Every structure is written in structure tokens, then in C-alpha cells.
Image: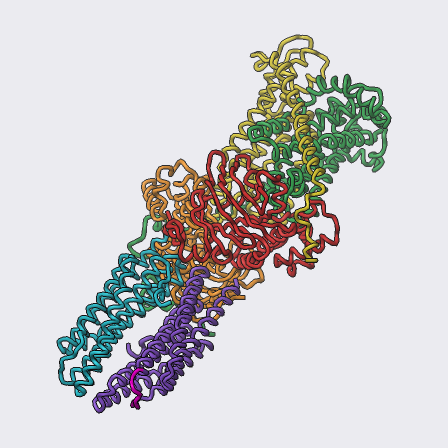
Chain colours: A yellow, B orange, C green, D cyan, E red, F purple
């Protein structure tokens, strides 16, 4: 019986019951409050974008280059085209290298020292501030070439895509159970075939998500373009010439003293956001119906 | 039809761990053979040596010979070729999640470059029928993914996938241990059906399962094959004291 | 040594064993199906496998090359400034392009203060949102709210900057800052002059920007905590908050720290929005409401107009410093996670 | 979790037991027929059938053991297998009684024929019908039918007691025929034992079907 | 010591799914009671109604009354209080991975405001001893985390954690289904030990397990309690045809 | 996966079977003692002990059934339980034989005492020692000891045959004492049956220990 006494007294009502209940309510309130606080700026931003940007959207905005200072009108057509070109170059560079590196880390070097070092390096690269990337690419390409170019801007953005894609590819590949790989090997499928047709294919929704996220992220980047693509007031499709980009143009307009340019900046932002929202939405759709969910 | 397996002086290591020691046994063709024993006794390693899966592990190493039919799998063929002849079913159902049911079953042929559609259709249907899954999935063959099936169906799908390449030997590594009792019973029935046409080697830690499906049973202990005999003999009157102790729960 | 092959002793069995073994393997009889015939005629070579793995490895090594190149370019670009100012560069407050006298301290100060301010504001909110969304939110609200926070993460920096200039700054200047001056003025952190733009505005916009990153990562790690952990706590008689504390936050804490550090890394390197609201004045002031400058901003603003090599070199050295800081922060995060996880697998159970 | 194969094996076991039961019953009938017509060739048949009954018994026992070891039967299946094991033993002993009777018949054959005051064929018919009825209960899984066997045992016992008295009276009157009377007495006892075995079988059937242990419910 | 449980007219729903229908049953104190039945029969839902865990699911709903001892848990107390008196062990071991072994066991008491070190030490040791884990972990109590133990040890740790608050009733939801045979045997032995002091309700899909550990067994089918009786009765001679069909594998 | 509890239950089962065996053997000894000293009170004791033997039999059978259902015994354990079930039945029948003997003794008591040319106590001693020896084999799990029982059965059979001839001779000489002689004959047969049961027990022990089915290995 004496030993029994040492136990928590059974039918004793918790002495700290009220304190526990109070803590429970407080925590709930705090969580609800912070959610509301976080939602506020977003709602505000969208409200302003629509309110200020929508009114300036017209056909000219998409088809015209900017008007010279002092003239009203003009658009951001060249910037939209420039962004498309830059992103095209970036994707062509970043997606294959990123995915291949991800495959190496997850499949071939798994657990090895080299793979771990590559993973760490990718993390480092991922953390490199975009402005530093701009400076580096400037030193790497612009200085030797002696002029700004769409190519250098694309390279800067492409490099920024690589680590994101590598890491998501790796993570998605690792989510593919070992048993699926064994299943492929057990059927007598060669390794390269198994990696491409089974593992990568199984992980493809996740890998696509990673690519889209990387794409969305660099689509809005301004800093690395400041000293690489540089910007351009005119139509240009040459990858050896400076080129305009949507975020770059927005930056220029936003920090200018002209109301008309402010108006265009809002409109440009709205277009940029819509572009990104659409791609993020697409990502969610792909990931949401992702077949991976069923993989045990 | 299946072929017999003859294992001589098989030794296997995981790193410095000598997991299989001097295994000698002859597994008869077109019968089910069960391997039982406590965890870590080497029974899983043993089946993984029969299709050279053991060596996919970087620290796995094997010596000795395994004849499947007349072929010494360690000297006369590449692992990839062996595995086309020796099907394997794993502990957890592992259908390819992004593939449809049809593609899953066809994968063994397709991934090796086979393209004849008519033959593929036939093979898929035959394999699913053999795996007792055809009736349940025939309407969603190309619509549903392998991962959308229930656990028991997934495992039968994996069996169908292994059957599609028409192997001579089927290895099963605890094929029902992740399934509920009803699915387990179905898998057992299936094994019972298949054993007239294939040489089946099944690893299980469920002695009752071994008793139900296999004609012959081998008992592994500490990396050695202690006893190999007709199943009903093992379960009613084993020769070796250690087998009897394990069977009756006097072990350890 | 005698080899004893074990054969099941079933009467009459041995006859049957020999038969299949007797026929030769490659053409095991008339029963051979087209599938088997095809597969057995197919040889496999390791050549394709070797090519494939070489290509993959090459791509993986690219990542090394890129980081090495960046480092090389930054170091060689800042050679001039390093030679001239040495380590003192980071502790000097002078920034005088006219006289060629450069020191990075105001920028380092501005970067640190604005980032820490951002963390102070963002972390509790982010964790609160994450907890609300995963543990308390009614089901029908969960998906839309999560989508909204993800959208916050997708908004480009320059758009934040735009919004900050035209909406946030006036709001701070006209209502928030006066309030802060009145209430917290005694601390010396919130005193006039109140321009609207400045360190505080930079901190606030950074907070808004890193909030979604921190909260969505936190949400991810919280969702990764197995339901079984929650049930374990509830079954012990925990209230909902105690369940969250014991069964959720405790298990997710390493992941949350990782999320915070990632947010910090983001804040340190963030350029455009900060450039647009921090005020861009290379001076140090105790008041958070005063104008400031950050490392990224100074590069963004002055790089393209840097007239002489020393000026450029000083800016690149600031870039180098930023680069090194981010590596350190990242390494810190990794070491931290490693140190804590060593004893306890986070995703155990 | 339908265990179709297992239940087919149980059917198989039942089938075999019925074959064996048929053999045991036939042995009794032949032995009694041998007594009736004093035909030694029938005795040989009985002796020969014993060997096959015994090998059947071993086989059934082994099957039951294998099923117990390999299928973990439960509830009605388990009771069935246990019933089979017991019925099996009883049937084998019925076979032994037949052999015993046929040996007595052989001994009687060596002695002068005499009218014996005991109706062995009637007793045999009764004992046989008990065995048959018990097996009918087994085939139909009908405890009622099996129950009716228990009542019949009393009549066999009474016939046996009557045989004792009439035979001992006969001996006192005609001591010359004592050996014949003694053999008849022992044959009567053999038949009484067959009745007992039939009763045991009936009890086992009831146990299997109802799960109730009816043994000794009269005696205890 | 444990107390009895009396369930009357218990109904439970998942959304519109009526998973438990009019359950009436009296579970005796200080005995082990097993609940068996096919997957989805409601046995797990049933135990989750005994400590109001069912209602933590947003779509879970319950009517009817459950008396634990004298207390009607649905009207006379809050879930938090109930769960302190009714311990629960889950299918997969779920120790708190970031806590040491000691902290895991002490967590229930700490929640309730216990801070006295001497008492805590005593209770932790006693609980671990009861759970047959003390000898294996006593040297690493505060050094090792709960997650560093093996699966079977983790489950015993969870049992110790539940025992530490000295519950009157222990609910176990397939406590050994995720474990290997050796660990399963240990857990079964443990349940056998504990049942003299606690009222134990164990859900299992392993009939043999029910047979081995429990005095009484209830058979659930389609959300109804078909039969409740002494275990040896259920397994040798059940009253209900459906029970017999399930037990003997004639089901479905 | 050590199943300590289960093996303890098996020990318990063995224990009980031995108690029952003791009771059956004692019943035989008492019945024969009653014959020797013509003491009816001993017959009452035998009659009374039958009830408890029967209830023991039911209990052991139920235990064995429960163990089979709940513990899925395998190999030696399974053979043990089956052996127990069979030994149990044989022991119960040994008890029955004792009752039968005691009833004959009662009948003999009503008749004038007479010197009978048959050594019932010697037969009883032999039969008893067979039972004891078979049980010794059971206790020690020793197939050798059990095997020796099989040989002893022949001696009992021979004594029984001798009894038949000497008693039938006596009847022919002294027809007056025919009832007494008949009773003695039946008692001898009872004892022979006890020997048979002991043989069965011994065979079951061998089956349990060795897993070999030795039944009929002489006859078949």
C-alpha cells in the first residue's frame, strides 16, 4: 500500500486544471490572431495591385515599348518579351543540370561523401543572395564580353534555378521507396532504364513542381539582372544585347518620380503577379493530383 | 514450367557480417518451398542470393554456386539476365505508382524493349488472371494506377508483374507480412495455385503460412540451414532439436 | 570437406527433382512463351549504364564549379579593396567615393538590424499561422489559407518594394511610427525624425517577405509530425495546447529552427524591396526610424555607377562578405540540425 | 479469410473415415455371418481386412495430426478433427472385436456344433445398427440421430446380460458343451463392446456438432 | 486496481458512416478482454470511444453511454480527465522522439503538475519495471531518446508511459501488429502480467493473440457486437454461427 | 518467442493426467483386492471413484481442447496433447474395467465361494505393472521404457488364454460352479483389456516422444 501511495493520486482533480485550461485558450487566441495579422498584408497588396494596376492594363501595355520620359502612353511589351527570353535561357540551362545533379545525389552517390558535399554545395548556392549572383555573373561574363547581354542575365537566373531543382529532385527521388527500385531491378531492368523510366517517372510530379517553383522564383528576380541584362527601352531579341525584363522595368518605374510611370509599375506588377499566380496554381494542381500520393 | 535450384557452399556477407554459412540445398522444381527462422537468421539474404539482389547492396558479398536449372547464375550470366528469369515479390507491395495497372504488368517486357502490342495484351491478361486479379481490374486496366489498388490487390499486381516475364523461379520475401488476414489468405491461395507451374521459394516468419502453402520447408538459424524436409514433417516431427525448439516456441 | 546437400525426403520426390534439372536451361522446352524467348535472347551490357552515370556525375560536379567560380570572381574582383583596407574594411564607417575612402560597417549594421527586426516580427507570427493551419483550422478553410500564404511567398521582391513605397511607408509614417515614438520612445529606438522610410520600414517589409517562407516550412515540418504523436499526447490527458506543445512543436522544433535560419538567410540577401524603403544613407543611428543602408542595397544602387576600380572593388568586397555570411548562416543551420538530430531521429516513430 | 483448401481437406478426412467405418462394420457382419454359417473362409476375410483397417487408421491419424499442425483449426473444425481422432480409434477397435469374434468362430468350428441359447445374429444386428446410426449422425452432422444411439446401448447390454444367464444355465445343464457356451459368451461380450464403441462414436459426433461433452452424462 | 466498464446503447459515426451500432457490453475489471473481427468491423472505433479519442476526429460522433467504474465519461467529465484515467497504447509505437526515456515515462505526470523529483523517479522506475523494460534501459534513462529503442522496446516504453499515470483501464489497439514475433511474444507476456491489476481491453486481428492473452473475447462484425463470452468458449465452441464462421475461416 | 506460459500449462496437463492415472490404477488394485478378500466395501469404493475418474477425464479433455484452440501447438507439443487425449481415454476405460471387475466380484459374492483355477491377482499385478510402466515412460518421456510394455502384453494374453482353458475344464468337471467360473473368466478378460489399454498408452507415449506411430507395427 505504501508503494501505491507513491503513484500519482488517482482521483485527485488536477490542481493545475484552471491554469491548463487558460493556457489552452490563450494559445488558441494567439494562433487565430497571428493568422489574421498575416493575411492582412496579402489582402492589402492584392487590393492595391488590382486597384492601381488594372486600370492601366490595355492592349498597348502588352504591345508597346515604353514611351520616352514626358510622353504618356507606352507599355511594357518589350519587357514581357525580354523576360520570356531570359527565362527561356535560364530554364534551358538550369532544368537539365538541376535534375541531373539531383539524380546523382539521390541515386548514384546516395549516402556517399561526394553526394553529401554536392548537396551541401547546392544549399550554399541556394543561399547566395541574388545581388551577389548578379555581381558574380557580371564579373564572369559581362566584364570579359565588355557589354551587358540577355545571355548573361539568363545565365544568372539559370544558375539560381539549379539548386532549387536539384534539391527538390533529390527529395522527390528519395520519397520513391527503395522497394520500387528493387522491383525494377527484380524484373531485370538495366539501371539507367530503371532510373529514368521508373524512379524519375514516379517522382515526376514532384520534380515538375520543383522546376515550376524555381521558375516562379527567378521570374520575379530583379537584382541579378541589374548588371547583366541591364534593361533596354527598345525591342530586342538578341541574346548578345542588353534586354528589358519585367521586374527590372518595374523597379525603374517605381523609383522614378513620374506618376505615369508609377501607374505602369503597378500594371507591370499585376501582370507579373498573375503570371506567377498562374504558374503556382498550376504547380499546386499538378502536385495535388500527383500520383505520388499513392506511392507507399 | 519452373526449374530446380541447386545451391552449393553458398556463403554471404554483409560487410564483415557472415550472414550465410555453407548453405547446401536442392529446391525441387514446380513446388513451393518455404524458408522459416527467427529474424536475422539469413532467410531473406538467402533468397536475395538466388537472383543476385544481395549484391546490389554495396557491402553485400557472396561466394559459392547457385544453379538455376543448368545455369550457374554467378558465373554464367549477368545479374540483369538472371533477374529476368527469376521473378521476385517483396515484403511491401511495390507497384510502380505512376503506371497504370496495364503498364505495371507490361513493364518487365516493355522496359526491356518489347513492343508487340498484341502479345503484350495477351501477356497482361494472362498474368493478371494467373494472379487472380483480372476480374477485379479488367475494367480499369489503363485508367487506374497501380497505387490506387488496395494493399492486397497491389501485392497480387506485383505477382502478376513478376509472372508477365514468365520466370522459371518465383522468389517471395514475406509476401503477405504487410497485409491484413483476408488479403493474406488470398495470396496464400494464389501461391498454392501457382506452385504447379513455377518453382516458388517463399520466405516467411509465419510458421502457419509455411505450413499452409509449402510442400517443403527449410529452417534457418544463425545463417545456417538447420533442417530441410517435407513441411508436414517439419511441423509434426522435425529431426533436429533446434527446429523443434523453434517450432514449439522453446527457442532462445 | 564433405558437402551435404539437403534434399527434402519426400517419397518419390527425387525422381521429379531431376527431371527439370535434366533439360538444359537456355531452351527449357516447348513451353517457352514468346515473352521468355524474347527476354532470354536479349543480352545486357553495362556500357549504357556507364555512359549514363558519367553524364549524371558531370552535371552534379557543375554545382561545384559554379560555386568555385563565384568565389573566385568575388575574391579576385575585390583584391584591390582587400589590399588597401584589410580587415578594417568591415569596421570602418567611412563611405566616400569622392576621396576613395571605403568602410562597410554601416551596411553590415543595416543588414543585421533590419534582418533581426524582421525575424523578431515574423517568427512568432509564422509559427502561429502554421499551428493554426495544421492543428486548429476548420477543414474548409485550410486549403484556401494555405494557398494564400504560398502566394505571399511567390510575390516578387520588386512588387513588395512597390507596395511598400506607396502603401506601407505612408502608413508607417502617419500612424504606426508616431504611436511607437509615444510608447517606446524612452528606449531611444523609436525617436524622431520620422521619414517613414528607414530601418524600421525595411525590417517590416522583410518580415512580411520572409513570413510565408518561415510559415510554410514550419507548416511542412508540423504536418510531418506523425498523427500518432498527437494521439499519444491526447491519450495521456493533454489539452489541445499541451498536445501541440508536447506532441507537435517539440518534435518539429529542429525543423522550425531550420525554417527560421532559412528565413534569416533570405532576409540578409534580400535586395530590391529593402533598397526601395530603407532610405539608403550610409550612417549608423540608434533610432530604428532613421535612414539606413544594407549591403545588398548599396551594391544594387551604386554598382553600375561605380566610376573607378577601387570603388567597384569595395562594392565587390561587400558582395564577398555577403556571400561568406550566407555560407556561414547555412553552415550554422546544418551544424545545428546535425547536433540536435545526432541523438534523436526527428522523424522517429 | 476463407480457408477453402482446408475445408476441402476436412471433407477428405471425413470421406476416409467413412470408408474405414464401412470396413469395420463389414468386418463385424462377416464375422457374425461366419458364426451363423460356420464358414471359416469368412474368418480369413475378417483377418485380412484388419490389416487394411489398421493402415487406414494410421493414415487418418496422420492426416488429422498434419491438419492440426498446419492449419490451426478452431471451434467446430477443431472439434471435428478431435472427434475424427477418437472415432477413428473406436472404429479400429470395432475392427479388433470383429477379429476377436472371428477367432472364436474358428475355435467353435473345431468343436462339435451345438444349439446355443443366445441370439448372436440379433445382437450383432443391433450393434451394427448402432454403429451405422452413429455414422449417420456423423455424415449428417446430426446430434439428434447420434443421441438415439445412446439409448440403444442399453438393449445391447441387456441382451448381453441375458446371454450370460442363459449360457451359464446351459452349462450347468450340459457341461459337455461348456467350451462352446464360453465362446458364445465371449462373442456376446465382443458385440456388447461394439455397441460401446458405437456409443463412443455417437458421443464424439455430439461433441463435434454441439460442442457439448455428453460423456458420462448418464453415469455422472 | 482497475474498474469495470459498462457500455450501453453505444453508437458511433464517421461522417455519415454508422460504424458502431447499439453496442451493449460489460467489461469486467482486472481482466483482459480481447476484441476481434474483420477489418472495418468497428473494433478500433469501439476502443476509441472508451477514452473519447473517437471525437478528436472532426467527423467522429458518438451517442450512448459508457460507464467507467461509476463515471459516465460522456456526461460527467471532460475528455482530458477521462484520458488520464484510461490509458491507451496504439498500433505503432509512438514514444515522444525528442524526449529521453525518463521524460517519456514522466510526461503524463508532468502534465498534471507533478514536479516532485523523488516521486517522479519512483514512478518512472516502477512503470518501467511493470513494462518489463527497466533492466534494458536503466543505464540510459536520461541519456537515450525514446526513439533510439527498438520497435518492441518502444512499444513497451509506451506501455510504461501509459502506466505511469496509474490508469484504471488500459486500451490497446493492435499493440503488437507492427512488431516482429519475438517482440509480440514479449508484449503478450506483459499484458498477461498486467491484467491482474488493470482492466485491459485489447483490439487484435490476430485470433491466436486474443486466445493467448484474454479471458474474455468479443466478436465484432459490421459495427455490431455479435458475441461476447469467455475466450476459450469463443474459440472452441462459440454460440453464434457468424462467430464460428469467422473463427474457422468460413467467413465472407 | 518463448512460450513459457503455454509450456507451464502443458506441465499442468501432464500433472493432471498422472493424478488420473493413479486413480485408475488404484481402482484396479482395489477391485482385485475385493476379489481376493471378498470385501464388498472395496467394491463401493471403486464404484465411487469412477465418478471422479470420469470428471477428471472430461476436465483433461477440455484442457487439451482449449490448448489446441488457443495455443496452436506444433511438433512435439502437438503430439503430446494428442497423446494426452488418447491416454486419457484409455485410462478412463481402465477405470471402467475396474468397475466391471468390482461388479463381477459383487456377483461372485452372492454365490458360494469356490476355489477357482485361475490366478487373478497375478494377472492383476501384471496388468497393473504394465499401466505403471507405461506411465513411467510418460513421466520420463522415455520411449524405451514404454516399448518394454508392448512385450509384457503377450504374457497377459497368455495368462488369459490359460484362464479360458482351465476354467472351461473346471466347468466341465464341476458344472455346479459354472457361474463362478464364468465370472472369473470375465474378470480375466477385464484384466487382459487393462493390459491392452496399457499397451495403447505405451504406444501413445512412443508416438509423443519419437513422433513415430508404432501402432500395429507388430500386427501390420
Which residue appears at 73% of the width and 32% of the height?
C119
Question: What percent of the width, then of the height, locates residue A69?
Answer: 69, 11
Question: What percent of the width, then of the height, locates residue B29?
Answer: 35, 60
Q: Quadrant of the N terminus of chain E?
A: bottom right
Quarter of the view holding residue A51: top right
Q: Nearer the viewer, residue F137 or C262?
A: F137
Whether residue B69 can be seen here: no
Quarter of the view holding residue B117: top left
Q: Is residue F113 located in the magenta-colored stretch of the structure? A: yes
Quarter of the view holding residue D79: bottom left
Would you place residue B230 above or below residue A164 in this image?
below
Question: What percent of the width, then of the height, locates residue A158?
Answer: 61, 32
Would you place residue C133 above or below residue B17 in this image?
above
* Relative side of C300 to D16, left or right: right
* Relative side of D29 to F208, left or right: left
Q: Nearer the viewer, residue A128 or F43?
A: F43
Q: Nearer the viewer, residue F97 or B142?
A: F97
Would you place residue B218 above or below residue E143 in this image?
below
Q: Which residues are magenta?
A: F110-116
Question: What percent of the width, then of the height, locates residue E42?
Answer: 47, 43
Q: Is residue B140 located in the magenta-colored stretch of the structure? A: no
Q: Dominant secondary structure of the magenta stretch?
A: loop
Q: How many marks?
A: 0
Which residue appears at 65% of the width and 42% of the height?
C238
Amino acid at each position: 500500500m505504501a508503494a501505491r501511495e507513491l503513484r500519482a493520486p488517482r482521483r485527485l482533480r488536477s490542481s493545475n486544471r484552471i491554469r491548463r485550461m487558460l493556457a489552452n485558450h490563450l494559445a488558441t487566441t494567439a494562433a487565430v490572431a497571428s493568422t489574421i495579422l498575416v493575411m492582412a498584408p496579402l489582402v492589402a497588396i492584392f487590393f492595391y495591385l488590382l486597384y492601381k494596376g488594372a486600370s492601366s492594363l490595355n492592349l498597348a501595355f502588352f504591345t508597346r515599348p515604353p514611351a520616352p520620359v514626358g510622353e504618356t502612353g507606352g507599355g511594357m511589351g518589350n519587357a514581357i518579351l525580354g523576360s520570356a527570353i531570359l527565362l527561356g535561357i535560364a530554364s534551358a540551362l538550369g532544368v537539365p543540370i538541376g535534375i541531373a545533379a539531383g539524380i546523382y545525389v539521390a541515386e548514384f552517390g546516395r549516402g556517399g561523401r561526394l553526394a553529401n558535399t554536392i548537396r551541401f554545395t547546392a544549399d550554399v548556392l541556394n543561399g547566395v543572395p541574388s545581388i551577389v549572383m548578379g555581381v558574380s555573373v557580371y564579373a564572369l561574363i559581362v566584364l570579359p564580353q565588355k557589354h551587358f547581354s540577355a545571355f548573361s542575365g539568363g545565365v544568372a537566373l539559370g544558375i539560381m534555378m539549379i539548386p532549387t531543382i536539384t534539391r527538390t529532385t533529390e527529395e522527390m527521388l528519395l520519397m520513391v521507396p527503395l522497394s520500387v527500385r528493387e522491383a525494377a531491378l527484380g524484373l531485370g531492368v538495366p539501371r539507367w532504364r530503371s532510373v529514368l523510366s521508373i524512379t524519375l517517372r514516379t517522382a515526376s510530379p514532384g520534380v515538375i513542381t520543383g522546376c515550376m517553383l524555381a521558375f516562379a522564383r527567378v521570374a520575379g528576380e530583379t537584382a541579378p539582372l541589374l548588371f547583366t541584362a541591364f534593361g533596354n527601352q527598345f525591342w530586342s531579341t538578341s541574346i548578345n544585347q542588353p534586354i528589358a525584363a519585367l521586374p527590372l522595368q518595374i523597379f525603374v518605374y517605381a523609383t522614378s518620380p513620374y506618376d505615369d510611370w508609377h501607374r505602369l509599375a503597378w500594371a507591370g506588377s499585376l501582370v507579373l503577379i498573375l503570371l506567377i499566380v498562374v504558374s503556382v496554381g498550376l504547380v499546386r494542381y499538378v502536385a495535388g493530383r500527383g500520383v505520388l500520393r499513392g506511392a507507399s | 514450367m519452373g526449374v530446380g535450384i541447386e545451391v552449393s557452399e553458398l556463403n554471404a556477407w554483409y560487410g564483415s557480417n557472415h550472414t550465410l554459412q555453407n548453405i547446401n540445398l536442392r529446391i525441387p522444381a514446380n513446388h513451393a518451398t518455404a524458408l522459416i527462422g527467427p529474424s536475422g537468421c539469413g532467410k531473406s539474404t538467402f533468397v536475395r542470393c538466388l537472383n543476385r539482389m544481395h549484391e546490389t547492396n554495396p557491402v553485400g558479398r557472396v561466394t559459392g554456386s547457385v544453379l538455376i536449372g543448368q545455369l550457374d547464375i554467378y558465373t554464367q550470366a549477368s545479374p540483369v539476365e538472371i533477374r529476368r528469369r527469376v521473378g521476385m515479390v517483396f515484403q511491401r507491395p511495390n507497384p510502380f505508382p505512376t503506371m497504370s495497372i496495364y503498364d505495371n504488368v507490361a513493364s518487365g517486357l516493355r522496359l526491356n524493349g518489347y513492343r508487340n502490342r498484341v502479345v503484350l495484351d495477351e501477356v497482361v491478361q494472362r498474368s493478371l488472371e494467373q494472379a487472380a486479379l483480372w476480374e477485379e481490374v479488367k475494367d480499369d486496366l489503363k485508367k487506374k494506377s497501380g497505387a490506387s489498388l488496395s494493399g492486397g490487390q497491389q501485392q497480387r499486381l506485383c505477382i502478376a508483374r513478376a509472372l508477365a516475364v514468365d520466370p522459371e523461379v518465383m522468389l517471395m520475401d514475406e509476401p503477405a507480412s504487410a497485409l491484413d488476414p483476408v488479403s493474406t489468405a488470398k495470396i496464400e491461395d494464389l501461391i498454392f495455385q501457382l506452385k504447379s507451374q513455377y518453382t516458388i521459394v517463399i520466405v516467411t516468419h509465419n510458421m502457419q503460412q509455411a505450413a499452409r502453402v509449402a510442400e517443403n520447408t527449410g529452417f534457418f538459424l544463425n545463417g545456417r540451414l538447420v533442417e530441410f524436409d517435407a513441411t508436414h514433417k517439419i511441423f509434426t516431427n522435425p529431426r533436429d532439436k533446434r527446429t523443434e525448439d523453434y517450432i514449439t516456441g522453446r527457442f532462445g | 570437406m564433405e558437402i551435404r546437400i539437403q534434399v527434402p525426403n519426400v517419397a518419390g520426390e527425387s525422381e521429379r527433382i531431376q527431371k527439370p534439372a535434366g533439360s538444359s536451361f537456355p531452351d527449357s522446352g516447348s513451353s517457352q512463351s514468346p515473352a521468355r524467348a524474347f527476354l532470354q535472347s536479349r543480352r545486357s551490357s553495362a556500357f549504357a549504364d556507364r555512359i549514363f552515370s558519367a553524364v549524371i556525375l558531370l552535371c552534379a560536379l557543375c554545382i561545384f564549379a559554379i560555386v568555385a567560380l563565384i568565389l573566385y570572381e568575388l575574391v579576385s574582383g575585390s583584391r584591390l579593396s582587400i589590399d588597401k583596407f584589410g580587415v578594417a574594411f568591415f569596421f570602418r564607417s567611412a563611405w566616400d567615393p569622392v576621396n576613395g575612402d571605403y568602410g562597410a560597417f554601416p551596411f553590415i549594421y543595416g543588414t543585421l538590424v533590419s534582418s533581426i527586426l524582421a525575424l523578431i516580427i515574423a517568427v512568432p507570427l509564422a509559427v502561429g499561422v502554421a499551428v493554426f493551419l495544421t492543428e486548429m483550422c476548420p477543414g474548409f478553410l485550410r486549403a484556401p489559407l494555405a494557398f494564400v500564404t504560398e502566394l505571399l511567398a511567390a510575390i516578387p521582391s520588386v512588387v513588395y518594394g512597390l507596395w511598400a513605397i506607396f502603401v506601407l511607408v505612408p502608413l508607417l509614417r502617419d500612424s504606426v511610427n508616431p504611436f511607437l515614438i509615444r510608447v517606446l520612445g524612452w528606449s531611444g529606438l523609436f525617436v524622431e525624425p520620422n521619414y517613414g522610410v528607414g530601418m524600421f520600414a525595411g525590417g517590416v517589409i522583410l518580415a512580411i517577405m520572409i513570413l510565408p517562407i518561415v510559415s510554410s516550412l514550419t507548416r511542412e515540418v508540423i504536418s510531418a509530425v506523425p498523427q500518432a504523436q498527437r494521439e499519444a499526447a491526447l491519450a495521456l490527458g493533454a489539452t489541445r495546447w499541451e498536445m501541440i506543445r508536447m506532441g507537435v512543436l517539440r518534435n518539429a522544433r529542429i525543423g522550425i529552427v531550420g525554417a527560421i535560419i532559412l528565413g534569416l538567410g533570405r532576409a540578409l540577401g534580400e535586395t530590391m524591396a529593402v533598397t526601395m524603403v530603407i532610405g539608403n544613407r550610409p550612417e549608423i543611428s540608434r533610432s530604428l526610424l532613421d535612414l539606413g543602408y544594407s549591403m545588398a542595397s548599396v551594391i544594387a544602387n551604386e554598382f553600375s555607377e561605380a566610376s573607378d576600380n577601387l570603388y567597384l572593388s569595395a562594392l565587390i568586397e561587400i558582395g564577398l562578405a555577403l556571400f561568406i555570411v550566407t555560407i556561414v548562416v547555412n553552415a550554422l543551420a546544418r551544424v545545428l540540425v546535425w547536433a540536435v538530430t545526432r541523438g534523436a531521429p526527428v522523424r522517429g516513430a | 479469410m476463407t480457408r477453402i483448401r482446408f475445408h476441402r481437406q476436412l471433407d477428405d478426412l471425413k470421406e476416409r473415415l467413412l470408408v474405414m467405418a464401412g470396413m469395420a462394420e463389414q468386418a463385424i457382419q462377416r464375422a457374425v455371418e461366419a458364426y451363423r454359417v460356420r464358414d471359416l473362409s469368412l474368418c480369413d476375410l475378417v483377418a485380412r481386412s484388419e490389416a487394411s483397417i489398421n493402415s487406414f487408421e494410421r493414415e487418418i491419424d496422420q492426416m488429422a495430426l498434419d491438419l492440426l499442425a498446419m492449419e490451426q483449426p478452431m471451434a467446430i473444425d477443431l472439434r471435428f478433427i478431435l472427434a475424427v481422432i477418437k472415432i477413428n480409434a473406436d472404429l479400429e477397435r470395432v475392427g479388433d472385436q470383429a477379429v476377436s469374434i472371428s477367432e472364436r468362430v474358428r475355435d467353435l468350428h473345431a468343436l462339435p456344433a451345438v444349439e446355443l441359447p443366445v441370439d448372436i445374429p440379433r445382437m450383432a444386428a443391433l450393434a451394427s445398427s448402432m454403429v451405422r446410426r452413429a455414422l449417420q449422425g456423423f455424415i449428417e452432422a446430426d446430434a439428434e440421430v447420434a443421441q438415439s444411439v445412446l439409448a440403444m446401448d442399453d438393449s445391447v447390454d441387456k441382451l448381453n446380460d441375458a446371454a450370460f444367464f442363459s449360457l451359464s444355465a446351459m452349462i450347468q445343464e450340459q457341461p459337455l458343451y461348456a467350451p462352446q457356451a464360453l465362446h458364445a459368451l465371449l462373442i456376446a461380450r465382443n458385440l456388447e463392446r461394439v455397441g460401446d464403441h458405437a456409443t463412443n462414436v455417437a458421443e464424439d459426433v455430439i461433441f463435434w456438432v454441439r460442442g457439448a461433452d455428453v460423456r458420462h452424462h448418464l453415469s455422472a
